[in-house]
């Protein structure tokens, strides 16, 4: 009551000034940035700072956070309050599992090059908005997915881990899966039945000797499949009949064909220019003994793919994949938009300062001053 009376007793020209002061203080509080980070446009880059924990002072409405290349080994509950966070990079830390209570607002989660051994169903059960999950270069031995979770996930990178069996119940909207460079020896029948949108599938550099009958039949949108550098049991024709027949009839491009000297097969056929052509859209040309260049057009088989997976390579423009190694040992993984945050300082040279000789501030002068003060408040370090 007393404060209300005090406000009522303020001179007419001071009330707007007090309002402006409170507004500037609020904007200044929202624009804080920890000393160990560089911040810009609701993004914070705290990478390569030797951090062992989440720095204090991050703004509550943060949308992008880069904590890569640090020494963080536990973030349980530390990010739960950042309900607007969309991109999180935890790569190259010391995490043994994904943090508990991650924000449900996440679109991209990068946790490559840690020490994660298990992806449990509870780690991702509430991540309805997640579109990209990168767990490459960890120590994963087991992954558990359950039905009707990760309903928007379209890019999954599990490469360079210790998986023995192809994961089952993978999210149905996946467009890109990289599970290369693992120890896969077994694929369960039906494990790929619920992936009608899958476009790029990387299975090279594993320990597969055969695939069960019908396991690839329901991937109707498949565009590229890599099978190279696997110990296929070519001498056991009964075990290999299905796969060898499938690669001959599929419209998809197969890189690293099993039991063949030709590294590229599938829907490709030999062209007059000494290369391969697939469906008049794909071109793979041998430009040297160990150099292969392949042009891959955008995926258009899934009508909703640009909407479901707007940041994936499958929904973007054409790319050129080039490797200076044989095609059957390629480890290329299509990457999404970079999340590394670039900071940019805004010059304040053109900001006019108000004349200090002015003795009074009228309501009209405060209105003119407001944009300038807000600009200064948001740009000052």
Image (spheres, rainbow, N blue to C red):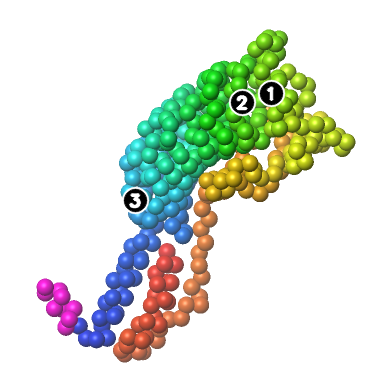
Give the side of residue 361 with respect to residue 148, left or right: left
Give the side of residue 292 with respect to residue 307, left or right: right
Q: Residue 91: in sight, yes or no?
A: no
Q: Residue 231 in the image: x percent, y percent?
A: 66, 16
Give the side of residue 2 with respect to residue 102, left or right: left
Q: Quadrant of residue 254?
A: top right
Residue located 42% across and 36% down the image: 149
Q: Secondary structure at mark 3?
A: loop
Of badges 2 and 3, nearer the viewer stands 2
The span picked out in magenta is 1-9
Residue located 32% across and 66% down the image: 26
Q: Quadrant of residue 18?
A: bottom left
User: Can residue 85 be found in the magenta stretch?
Assistant: no
Residue found at the far left of this picture:
1
The residue beneath circle 2 is 216
Q: Residue 265: in sight, yes or no?
A: yes
Q: Secondary structure at mark 2?
A: loop
User: Can residue 2 be found in the magenta stretch?
Assistant: yes
Q: Nearer the viewer, residue 348 or 229?
A: 229
- Give the Cα separation between the discs numbered 2 and 3: 49 Å
Dot 3, how many residues are within 10 Å of its Cα: few (below 14), some (14-19), or many (20+)?
A: few
Label for residue 246?
A: 1
Q: Are marks 3 and 1 in contact (CB under 8 Å)?
A: no
Label for residue 271?
A: none
The residue beneath circle 3 is 56
- Give the Cα separation between the discs numbered 3 and 1: 55 Å
């Amino acid at each position: 009551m007393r404060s209300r009376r005090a406000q009522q007793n303020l001179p007419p020209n001071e009330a707007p000034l007090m309002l402006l002061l409170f507004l500037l203080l609020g904007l200044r509080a929202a624009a804080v940035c920890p000393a160990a980070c560089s911040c810009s446009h609701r993004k914070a880059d705290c990478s390569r700072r030797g951090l062992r924990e989440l720095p204090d002072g991050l703004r509550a409405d943060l949308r992008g956070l880069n904590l890569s290349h640090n020494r963080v080994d536990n973030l349980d509950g530390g990010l739960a309050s950042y309900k607007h966070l969309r991109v999180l990079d935890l790569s190259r830390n010391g995490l043994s599992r994904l943090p508990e209570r991650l924000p449900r607002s996440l679109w991209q989660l990068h946790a490559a090059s840690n020490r994660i051994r298990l992806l449990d169903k509870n780690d991702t059960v509430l991540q309805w908005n997640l579109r990209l999950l990168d767990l490459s270069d960890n120590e994963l031995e087991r992954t558990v997915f359950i039905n009707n979770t990760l309903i928007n996930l379209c890019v999954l990178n599990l490469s360079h881990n210790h998986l023995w069996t192809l994961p089952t119940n993978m999210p149905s909207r996946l467009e890109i899966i990289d599970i290369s460079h693992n120890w896969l020896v077994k694929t369960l029948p039906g494990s790929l039945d619920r992936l009608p949108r899958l476009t790029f599938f990387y299975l090279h550099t594993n320990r597969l000797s055969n695939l069960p009958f019908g396991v690839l039949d329901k991937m109707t949108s498949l565009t590229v499949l890599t099978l190279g550098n696997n110990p296929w049991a070519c001498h056991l024709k009964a075990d290999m009949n299905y796969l060898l027949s499938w690669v001959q009839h599929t419209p998809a491009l197969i890189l690293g064909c099993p039991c063949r000297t030709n590294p590229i097969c599938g829907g490709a056929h030999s062209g007059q220019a000494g290369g391969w052509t697939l469906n008049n859209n794909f071109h793979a040309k041998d430009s040297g003994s160990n150099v292969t260049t392949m042009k891959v057009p955008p995926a258009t088989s899934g009508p909703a793919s640009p909407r479901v997976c707007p940041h994936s390579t499958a929904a973007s423009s054409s790319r050129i994949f080039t490797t200076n190694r044989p095609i059957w040992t390629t480890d290329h993984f299509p990457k999404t938009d970079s999340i590394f945050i670039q900071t940019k300082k805004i010059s304040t040279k053109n900001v006019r300062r108000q004349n200090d000789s002015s003795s009074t501030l009228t309501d009209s002068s405060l209105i003119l001053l407001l944009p300038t003060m807000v600009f200064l408040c948001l740009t000052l370090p």
